[in-house]
Image: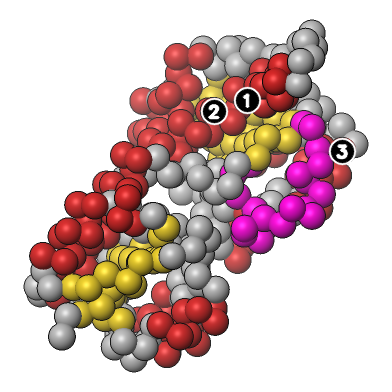
Amino acid sequence: MKKKVLVGATNFSATCPEAKALLEENGFSVLENPHQRPYTRDELKEIVGDCVAVSAGMESWDREILSLAKNLKVIGRFGVGYDNIDVRAAEELGITVAIAKGINGAAVATMAIGLMLSVLRKIPMFDRTTREGRWPRVMGSDLDGKKVGFLGFGDIAQKTAKRLSGFEVEMMAYDLYPNEEAAKDLKVRITDLDTILTECDIVSCHLPNLPETRHTMDEAAFAKMKPTAVFINTSRGPLVDEDALYQALRDGVIAGAGIDVYEQEPVSKENPLLTLDNLVCTPHTSAETNEVCARVGLNTAQNIVDYFNGRNPFYTITKKPF
């Protein structure tokens, strides 16, 4: 009987054919996500019991779900962030968790810049009004010459900084444990949070989603920003108090925002943020390019194969993989 691998990411056969083939060639059967959304808890409860491995998307792997997966040995996260996985519970249950570190950073960095340009140049509004037969003469703003501040200066922020260098911007970053060498190479000044908020024209969020970073961007934080400033978030939704962001955009406390992530996902169509013309929004798709999905899928599949062949998966985040 073949070992069953549950895939949480959508469109796996179409976007990751090499990954699926690798799993099948190594004796696994692949249970694909048939929905165009993450699995719900009830759906997971019905199917996790006989799975030996998971290629995890954004569905929740908390202690209850993990406890029901009696045969589960390894989770390969289809991406980098793992706030949807209870790592401590996984360790206690003897489940190895690995992530696809360093693979999707370039795509997320590109999206962050795409959102900056979309907000500054009002690209979505111009697309919509042109299709409607209107011809508005509304001024946008240049990216060149702006001060860009990074909240967090890990791999994705560094890749964003590298790509921004051609725009002749001034860059600074806030990070509790900054990579001073990378900052020097990329001409990024390390500074404190208040300086980022008060001085920068664009604030781009790249923090990890931790209890201590929840709602880093709250009413007080937005109040410190320039009224002409733009806020970008391609990291995680809970870093931002969405009520505070809504009020800041509605009341002109800041000029605009571009966000790819939300406190609750999928985002509800009733979310008041979606009514605002000075917000550009996308559906948590920063890392979803054909090229990235293929590479991440293959990495995740290889992690699973390696585990069952007695080799440590690439970049495990649980202790004692074996």
- 71 and 112: which is toward the camera: 71
Question: Which is the main secondary structure of the residues drawn in magenta?
Answer: loop
Q: Are marks 2 and 1 in contact (CB under 8 Å)?
A: yes
Which element carries disc 3, helix, strand or loop? helix
For the point 16% across and 66% down, the residue is 24
- 107 and 204: which is toward the camera: 107
Give the vertical position of 140 relative to 300 (above or below): above
Task: Determine if the magenta segment contains residue 11.
Answer: no
Q: CA distance from mark 1 to mark 3?
A: 18 Å
- Quarter-of-image position of residue 52: bottom left
Q: Residues within 10 Å of mark 1 (few under 14, many from 20)?
A: many
Which element carries disc 2, helix, strand or loop? helix
For the point 35% across and 66% down, the residue is 32
Instruction: Identify residue for label 2.
Output: 114
Position of residue 102 measured from the top left corner of the image (x, y, whole percent): 32, 46
Q: Residues within 10 Å of mark 3 (few under 14, many from 20)?
A: some
Instruction: Check disc 1 and give the amino acid type.
Output: Ser
Q: Residues within 10 Å of mark 2 (few under 14, many from 20)?
A: some
Q: CA distance from mark 3 to mark 2?
A: 22 Å
Give the vertical position of 255 relative to 193 (above or below): above
Instruction: Identify residue for label 3.
Output: 250
Which element carries disc 1, helix, strand or loop? helix
Q: Earlier in the sequence, mark 1 or mark 3?
A: 1
Instruction: Identify residue for label 1.
Output: 118
For the point 63% across and 25% down, the residue is 118
Q: Earlier in the sequence, mark 3 or mark 2?
A: 2
Instruction: Check disc 2 and give the amino acid type.
Output: Gly
Identify the magenta region. Answer: 259-278
- 166 and 176: which is toward the camera: 166
Position of residue 297 measured from the top left corner of the image (x, y, whole percent): 29, 54
Instruction: Check disc 3 and give the amino acid type.
Output: Arg
